[in-house]
Amino acid sequence: MNDKTQICDTILDAIGNTPLVRLPKDFDPEVKCEVLLKVDYLNPGGSMKDRIALHMVHAAEKKGLLKPGGRIVECSSGNTGAGLCVVAAALGYDITVVIPDKMSSEKIAALRALGADVVVTPCNVDIESPMHYTKVAGRIASEIEGAWWPDQYHNRDNTDAHYYSTAPELWEQCGAKLDVFVAGAGTGGTLSGMGRFFKEQNPNVKIIGVDPPGSILAHYWEHQEICDSGPYAVEGVGEEEVPGAWDPHIIDSYEVVPDIESFAMARRLAAETGIFPGGSGGMNLVAALKIARTLPADARLVTILPDYGKAYLSKVYSEDWLRDFGYLPKVGINNATVIDLMREKNKAVLFSIDNVSWAVRQAGERGVRPLPVQDGLGGELLGVFHEDRALALLAEGKDLDAMSVADCMAPAPTVLDAHAPWQEAVEALKHCEAVLVDVRGEYLSLDRRDLLQALKRLDHSA
């Protein structure tokens, strides 16, 4: 186990040795036993996949599959890609990551920031399609001389990484006392590698798999047959084929957790404990608590939080996204108001005494349009920033610091009251691109693009 009290020679030395945290006893009053959370999102790349990235790369080097100057090409839902990026940067390899477009924008941005060439593929294609991200990664790797495709879904080194690293680490932290281990599976490496190790230490340890609806793994484990896969939103777990890194014989039972419960649990854990997991961590905890409620007080259950909630600020932790996709209750059309159509967007306001240079910066960096101009904080709405006029001034090379916003204003568009019936917003936006909404003296924008998403939140049956 790495000792993180020492100075690390490289970032790779910081992988592993993540904390095991006890869930507060009052988190679920029905649970009498001890529930421990392996907070593996505290690895350098933000997930437990750093472990398999390092192990797979070292194994490939030893086998001669990856040589100096080579390129790593991998298909990933984001976390393995990020882990491989960390390893590639530290060891001097180039890297290409192929990722489906359903993954969060934060994950994709992080891969680029870590130096990857990122290829984004459509998520709504069959696994046999040449556009499926696994097929695209294999094709790219075959076309580049010196490229290596880890193929994490079918790479036994993935499983071995957890057998030789994560499992012994957790076993030591538990003092060799463990009754139940609960984890989801995507590639299956975590569940299978750790499960195999725990069973070797104590055959009585129960290994519980967790799956989202739409994944085939729980069904395959129970019936030994492949069923049709379906859509699900939780990332990094579930599968549409049987991965070679997954060993169903290690698993004692399976729990299936709906996305809505996974996301609600992740958000609750973050808000109530400060432990900040992704959606798969929420999924694991839902299943863990269900099992824990059946266990005696002297039992110990461990589950794992595979990745960090910061990778899902635009999804799991966004009320807009949750509402848009039906994970929060809809609002009946008879009770809905304009504010029910409002979205989480940047806010900004200009004052008439501001200079045009500041206004240009606010409009460009904040992306707020129309950008309201008020007569002081909470004051009268005077108009909106005149973008066309500002563009002309910029093109002419004028000194914008010397010009006042009062000289670069346009009349305000329609202003709606936040608590007006929602139909007023729809009617107003038939005739213009955007309106302002008065929310307790703060003027916020609402545009047609907002409506395209927000109108799905309304319940027409209510």
Image (cartoon, grey):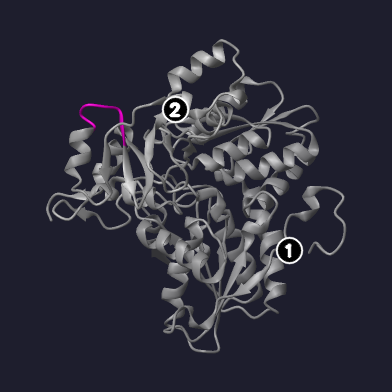
Q: Secondary structure at mark 1?
A: loop
Identity of the residue furthest to the top in this view: 396
Residue 135 vs residue 38: left or right?
A: left
Q: Residue 455 versus residue 276: which sits nearer the camera?
A: 455
Residue 310 lies in the magenta-colored region: no
At x 22%, y 55%, the residue is 331
CA distance separating discs 1 and 2: 38 Å
Q: Which mark is residue 17?
A: 1
Please tell me how crowded label 1 is: few (under 14), some (14-19), or many (20+) other residues with Cα within 10 Å.
Answer: many
**Residue on which the image places disc 2:** 131
Which quarter of the figure has residue 222?
A: bottom left
> Looking at the picture, how far across and down is residue 435, in whole percent?
30, 35
Residue 230 visible from this viewpoint: no
Q: Residue 244 versus residue 422: which sits nearer the camera?
A: 422
At x 67%, y 60%, the residue is 163
Residue 445 visible from this viewpoint: yes
Residue type beneath disc 2: Met
Q: Residue 274 versus residue 200: which sits nearer the camera?
A: 274
At x 43%, y 68%, the residue is 286
Q: Secondary structure at mark 2?
A: loop
Span highlighted in magenta in the image? 429-435
Q: How many marks?
A: 2
Indicate whether 8 appears above or below 88.
below
